[in-house]
Image (cartoon, grey):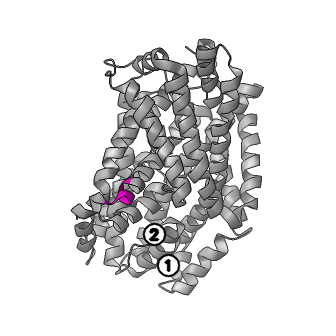
Amino acid sequence: MGNDTNVNNRDGFRSRGGFIIACIGSAVGMGNIWRFPTLVSQWGGMTFLIPYFLFVILIASTGVIGEFALGRAGGAGPVGSFGMCTEARFGKRKPGELVGYIPVLGSLALAIGYTCVMGWIFKYTFLAFDGGLSAMGQDMDAIVGSFNATASAWGANVWVAVAVAVSFFIMSFGIAGGIEKANKVMMPILFFLFVALGIYVFTLPGASGGYRYIFTIKPEGLLDPYVWIYAFGQAFFSLSVAGNGSVIYGSYLSKNECIPSSARNVALFDTIAALLAAFVIIPAMAAGGAELDAGGPGLMFIYLVHVMNGMAGGRIVAMVFFLCVSFAGVTSIINLYEAPVASLQEKLGLKRVPATAVIHVIGLAAALCIQAIVSQWMDVVSIYICPLGALLAAVMFFWIGGKKLVLESVNLGARKPIGGWYYPAGKYVYCVSVLVALIAGAILGGIG
């Protein structure tokens, strides 16, 4: 089951807690902060949250477990792990390895788009601390103009370079010394600061309307298929199943880790982070008298800036908020760059630092060039490439790897064997749902 000598020579997570925190870090990203609160607002509070929670349980208990187990069994990223599956079934590694490059390239493409977004985030974090954000006050023209200038061709060159430098610095120290350590510092601070923000927002006059809205259920809304489609899309993208990041992080796991319980913890904390964001953003918008009808970057860099600049202590709120967002972004971006870096190490035998440098130079060059089309770039990657990567990983593991490999891989190190439901749920329910995500995303122009 995979190349044990390869695993022994590879870097890995030092502790179970370190692995879980790193996976939570990869899952907690912009989707939790600028999309989740908007969807909760648009579709009616609990009307959206009920299907969302159900889909988080479905995806975590099938896809997240599957990607972790696939990576650990293969002792490699998507290229090596897919190769292991085709070798187990057909006696040939090559076809699987070739297919494995698709999610690796997808991970790199997403990392490139994310690098631009990280550039914006670092710039706004700096502006929050140096007073540049609060100086714009509630002048919508100034706020919009500032963001448009940032998110334009060659608009944030220095900050994009800063984003790449931060990612390169952390990743150069490897898995245990870089990624695990960085997440152990940033994720607890992020959760603590978000809770503090939530408590502060709770004290604002008018915030209660936001909470009332979050806890509203419109039974007729649950009959709307679009609510279910978008809830599935958000759960799918929030849990980072794309055949790359979870597979590569799984490959760094020791053989005695219980994968089902790790997947459960990742899903739980990712959901808590998303809810924290909603409990900060929706009541803050309500207190500021603003409608939460715009998601994406506009929410964070335009509407929230407008609201924060109008509230008491708004400058401090903006500093805390953008610091949180920068931590969420950094822990996600290092996960996205990890699959291509590890693939270079596996295939070309490069040492950690040169492999990291090559990938980050490619990332920087591409990110600088796509600044004017980041939105379209991210749409293509998230609508087509991420669900395709998840589908390929699921088909490789459940269909080509087969029942024996699946159950051995998942049960290795488990406290008790996984139930008989797991294999059919993964093979049929999860695979079909990922296919639906791919088709629905293509038809609706994105569902996550």
Task: Provide the residue span drawn in magenta.
Answer: 224-228
| Residue placed most toward the observer, 275 or 385 | 385
**Which quadrant would the N terminus be assigned to in this image?**
top right
Q: Residue at x 73, y 53 (%)?
A: 364
> Measured along the vertical axis of the image, is residue 15 above or below residue 235?
above
- Which residue type carries mark 1? Ser
The overriding secondary structure of the stretch rendered in magenta is helix
Q: Residue at x 70, y 39 (%)?
A: 356
Image location (x, y in percent) of residue 127: 56, 71
Image location (x, y in percent) of residue 119: 63, 61
Cα–Cα span, label 1 and label 2: 8 Å
In the rendered structure, the answer to whether residue 200 lies left or right of residue 63 reads left
10 Å neighbourhood of mark 2: few (<14), some, or many (≥20)?
A: many
Q: Which mark is residue 134?
A: 1
| Location of mark 2 (residue) | 318
Where residue 223 sits, quadrant-wise, is: bottom left
Q: Residue at x 28, y 58 (%)?
A: 222
- Do the residues under discs 1 and 2 have CB atoms within 8 angstroms? yes
